[in-house]
Amino acid sequence: MLILLHKKNRTLGLAFLAALMISVTANVAASETQQQYVLRNRFGTSVEINAPAGYYIVKQTTSSVAGSMVLPGDQTWFGRGVVSVFASRRWFRSADVTLFHVRGNDLTDGRLHLTGVKNGEAQDAFGAFQFVELNWTVPGLEIPIVTGFQLYQDRPALVFVQRFPKGFKGYANGEWTVPSVAFPQFVAENWGIPQNLYSWTSGGMWDHRLGWGDAFTNQGSVDPLVTSAPDYTTLILSSFANYLIATQQSGLSPMADQISRGGISCGIEGLVPDLPSGFEHKHILVAGHGIHNTFTEWGKMLLEKAGKKPPSKYQDDTLSYLLFMDDAGAYYYEHDFKEPGYSTYADIILAIEKEAREHKLRIGAYHVLDDKQQRDYHEGLYEPRKDLFPDGLAKFHEQLGKPLMLYMMWIEAGGPYRQKYAYFATDPGPIPGEMGDVFYTPEYWKYTADKLASWGTILLQHDFLSDYEGNRAMLSGLDKMDVYFKNMAKALQAKGIDMQYCMALPRNIMESTENPIMVSLQATDDHHVPMAEPKPQPDNPDNHDPFWWKHVIFTSALYGALGIWPSRDNIQTIADPNAFEDTLVANLLGGSIELGHRLGECNFDLLRKTYREGDGLLLKAGRPIVPIDRCYQLGCSVGYTQSDLGGNSWYYVLSLPRAGYLPSFKPADLGVTRDSVIYDWDTGVAFLRQSSESTPLMQEPKHQYFVVAPMLESGVAVIGDTSKFVTMADKRISLVETGQHTARVGVMASAEYSPIISGYSGARLDGVETGGRQLQAVSSLDRLKAANSGWFWDYQTNLWHVKLDFSDSPAMVERVFQISTQ
């Protein structure tokens, strides 16, 4: 709903227009701008725009919560909004406000001139929206600027638009964290806005920040910024275009009266020298109820805008099977790629593959050419070391019989590639701390993609992406990094090579929506196991592993929303005292499960909990693990993910109390509204719970892990293959159908292994049949394990167990059993 309010007859105009639900489209000259505008949608978001006064207010409807300082109704979370433009060493504002001085700015603020207003309705790929556009000029300068609001009616989104009809010459202000045109820009006194909002923002691979107070509690870069009220009404503010040169900064600025105000400034960073004619930039505010739900909608909008379909969790062999990842922290990386009795590193990896096959473990791909495996990178080349791969990578790939995942960082400045390919010069200094020569042309990337393909590469990991942020030479280009990534992606895509990002910052994460081959991401820093280092360290991994578990669960919400599959860095399954938790977390993330062990030091039984016997396919949930919403408010470390099948959902809940303790959880935390069975994976105990009933959690163990299964119409719950972490993975359990007294379950397996499928029933089953014949009931679980097929119901635990015979099928097949109940 769009409402125009003249200062006269404001009350009458509001009532009349609200009653008629009309929308007016008009072009208004500067002399006719004594109007106010109100935009509203059905998701509780509204924008009040006072054109002549030069400010706007964004409000969001919240509900009442006992003891909350956020009152029900429309609430102003971010304070008053203005437009600010930096030109000729001076700020020009749409309203009288003082904040965010820039180096070299020693002049009094000026006032922007409002030259026109346009409002109405329109439609784009996201649907119908109402809009208001304000036209501004900087006094004495020919710089027309348009700032617009687009409030969607059928999507919970408000888009802020900056448009430059004639461009902006001399845009740069010298600060990459400060936009020379700030819109939206919110400022607020420390009163008059909610003071008990919860906020979260990501620092990419290394950190995330939780806050409590007003919307400005988290300082610095806050793109994206998640804020939520005690009732879990949630707003997410982020850039919505030009991700690699956008900035969104939160800070405190002293006022003339020395009262501190918070502020958030959004726009294009201030090192870009000029903006071309017709340039456009956007930020977006997405509203919702529930933090995870809002993240999901936000991610959908970014992906839809770019036209990117989220990659499959089985996109390539690095995601479908276990991956050997020999990067920093892995055993051989830390031991100079040597093993007694082996002359080369290539021979060691061939022995790792042989050992895996002997244990029927399928490693899908091998990560090679990490920084220490490359020729001295000060030569400015991207080639393998001869002493490690004496016959070259192509021959190594042929001998290994497995695809490769290649590592890449920046190219040292001054190398031989300069003689043939154009490049962007960057800030001086050696790689990897600086960016060296950034070769960006299609010719260079075709050459590199051809080389990678000849080596058997299916995935390229690009490391040290964070070096870009703060690199003044690269940030001074409007599209330098964009050109780099697009030419890279086009060349790699032509060769069937996907990408993984490493050391990524949020701007890289959002940019990935525009990169069709970016599928996965290294979500944690290098994973070192102190006792496996060349000189064992007394450091206890418990001091740092819980930090990374919590960090990756929180940041996984960002990654998963944008269709990225994150991974935990390399795991040494015997040397690492936290190998169980590391492997479980890695499996629930849905990305690569990365092995970094020494030859002869692999816990094959632990790894068997992650994959399907017979073909080695990883068994995964439907999305990466995320925190339950309460953890954003309480700082705890309880995450969940889910499998969806036949209109029902199964949830996997992981508590990591050493990373942040929560005393209990309930099915309602997961969005469940029906009765559920809570299965304690570690103890094998199951219990029935209503959605509002709590399950106590312990503080002492490293972890507790639960499967939450829905009670079906037939009076049973299917828990799945409890020998696996993801018990209801769709590549193991292919079907669940239920009637009033029956439940049908599809199982995928082969002769390599006949799994036992478990579930819950308050009474003994009437029977189980498959293929038109009744399965025989046996008297114990041990007897069922020894039998080819059968079923057993345990009256002490109320758990039923069914085993089908797959011994006659060398290939993976689906077989269905049907349970009958009383």
Image (cartoon, helix red, strand yellow):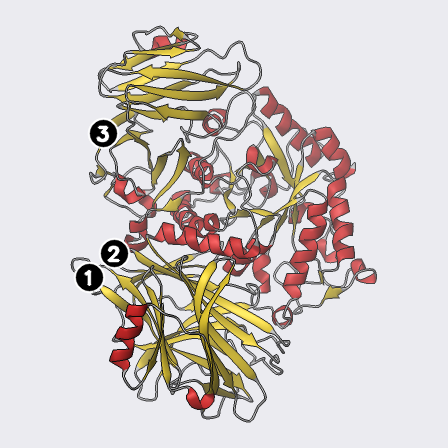
The secondary element bearing badge 3 is classed as: strand
Kind of residue at badge 1 = Ser
**Whole-Å distance between the Cαs marked 3 and 2?**
27 Å
The crowding category of the residue bearing disc 3, from other C-alpha atoms within 10 Å (few below 14, some 14 to 19, many at least 20), is some
Kind of residue at badge 3 = Leu
**Whole-Å distance between the Cαs marked 1 and 2?**
9 Å
**Residue 306 x/y as whole percent:** 56, 56
Instruction: Residue 68: give its label.
Output: 1
Instruction: Residue 688: give its label.
Output: 3
For the residues labelled 1 and 2, say whether their Cβ atoms are less than 8 Å apart.
yes
Answer above or below: position of 472 versus 772.
Answer: below
Instruction: Residue 50: give its label.
Output: none
| The quarter of the displayed image where residue 414 is located | bottom right
**Residue 549 x/y as whole percent:** 41, 45
**Residue 672 x/y as whole percent:** 29, 40
Per the image, the residue denoted by label 2 is: 231
The residue furthest front is 20
Give the residue at x 72% y 50%.
491
**Whole-Å distance between the Cαs marked 3 and 1?**
32 Å
Instruction: Please report whichever mark, 3 or 1, sits nearer to the chain's N-terminal start.
Output: 1
Give the residue at x 53% y 46%.
310
Answer above or below: position of 728 versus 147.
Answer: above
Q: Nearer the viewer, residue 131 or 694?
A: 131
Kind of residue at badge 2 = Asp
Q: Nearer the viewer, residue 503 or 75?
A: 75
The crowding category of the residue bearing disc 1, from other C-alpha atoms within 10 Å (few below 14, some 14 to 19, many at least 20), is some
**Residue 470 x/y as whole percent:** 56, 68
Answer above or below: position of 678 versus 92.
Answer: above
